[in-house]
Image: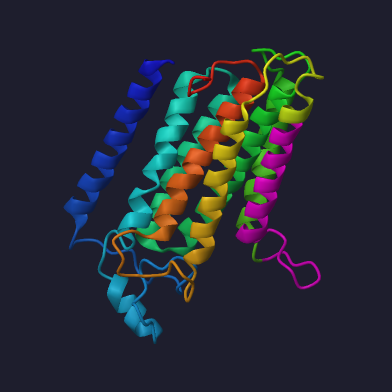
Amino acid sequence: MNRNAWRIAALVTLVVAAVGGGLAIRVNGHFTWGTPEMPKAQCEALLAQPTAQVAYQARVAAAVVREPQNTWSNLAFVFVGVLIAARDRRPFPRLLGAALCSLGLTSGLYHASLSPAWRTADVAMMSWVTVALSCVGIAALRRKPSNNYAPFHLSIGGVSGALAMLAAVSRNDIKIAGIKPFDSTYTTVAGVALISALLLAGVVFGSRLGHRVRPSPGRIILLTAVVVAGIGCQLGDHPGHCFCHPESAVQAHAVWHILMAAAIALAYDTFAVIEDKDPLVRRS
């Protein structure tokens, strides 16, 4: 295990947290984000019994960090992103690390501001993470794994990521048969399905593709449990659902952030095992 990468990830995350926290304290009382968007899925900014948009706006209008738990929990994405990028110098893992760090920053800014513009950036970075992790998975399934990636493969990853982000930006403008196919709910489900298919292919067909190692059942079970728990937190955080408690000390959407960061780390780890590379967590 490369302990230096873990130290770097912890240090960078602490620096980002310190800078963000320092800025929030410094501008408190001197800066506002403007009018927040209408309440969406997350509950942290809502009143226990939201009855009017006026009450909602009054609750968050003066705050610099309008959803504290949902904002700071995004540091988990920054930590995992830096850890992967520092640990694995190959282009696709570096791409994944950059996407995760960008997601952590944009999602943090969205939950701090509740601004529609930052929501769009948040959704776009989620798409980029999905593409980057898919690139890592496809590379792991190559018959002859290599540390070298042709510029053509990198360009495919870059173009695919750009198209995914473009779709995220225009998600409310594209409708097919009355359905918005690029809505974040659909794209999240599609991303989970794609990554799951790549993992399944690696586990089932890895030996046929010339790989010597299969991930242990425990690793797959843990990854599945984390994803299911994360999806449960995300769905349960909707207004009126079981985990939607605006005054709670623990917010389900914040837990979703942490679990999804862990799931991405576990998925990357599983692809590393499939490719017979050194994972973040040592094999038992």
**Does residue 139 lie above or below 236 as drawn?**
above
Q: Considering the image in quadrants, where does the N terminus appear?
A: top left
Position of residue 194 measured from the top left corner of the image (x, y, whole percent): 71, 43
**Does residue 36 lie above or below 232 as drawn?**
below
Which secondary structure class fits the magenta region best? helix
What residue is rendered at 44% in x and 71% in y?
Answer: 37
Q: Which residue is outermost to the bottom?
A: 51
Foreground residue among 262 and 162: 262
Left or right? Give the position of 272 relative to 262: right
Foreground residue among 259 and 63: 259
Left or right? Give the position of 276 relative to 70: right
Foreground residue among 108 and 115: 108
Position of residue 183 measured from the top left corner of the image (x, y, whole percent): 65, 61
The colour scheme applied to this rendered structure is rainbow
What residue is rendered at 57% in x and 32% in y?
Answer: 218
Q: Is residue 183 magenta?
A: yes
Left or right? Give the position of 157 relative to 279: right
Q: Quadrant of residue 18?
A: top left
What residue is rendered at 25% in x and 69% in y?
Answer: 62
Left or right? Give the position of 233 relative to 67: right
Position of residue 235 measured from the top left corner of the image (x, y, whole percent): 54, 63
State which region is magenta. Answer: 173-201
Q: For the image shown, how many numbered marks are present on the structure?
A: 0
What residue is rendered at 73% in x and 16% in y?
Answer: 211
Foreground residue among 79 and 202: 202
Position of residue 224 measured from the top left corner of the image (x, y, whole percent): 59, 43
Q: Is residue 43 magenta?
A: no
Q: Quadrant of residue 276?
A: top right
Q: Quadrant of residue 129?
A: top right
**Does residue 216 lie above or below 190 as drawn?**
above
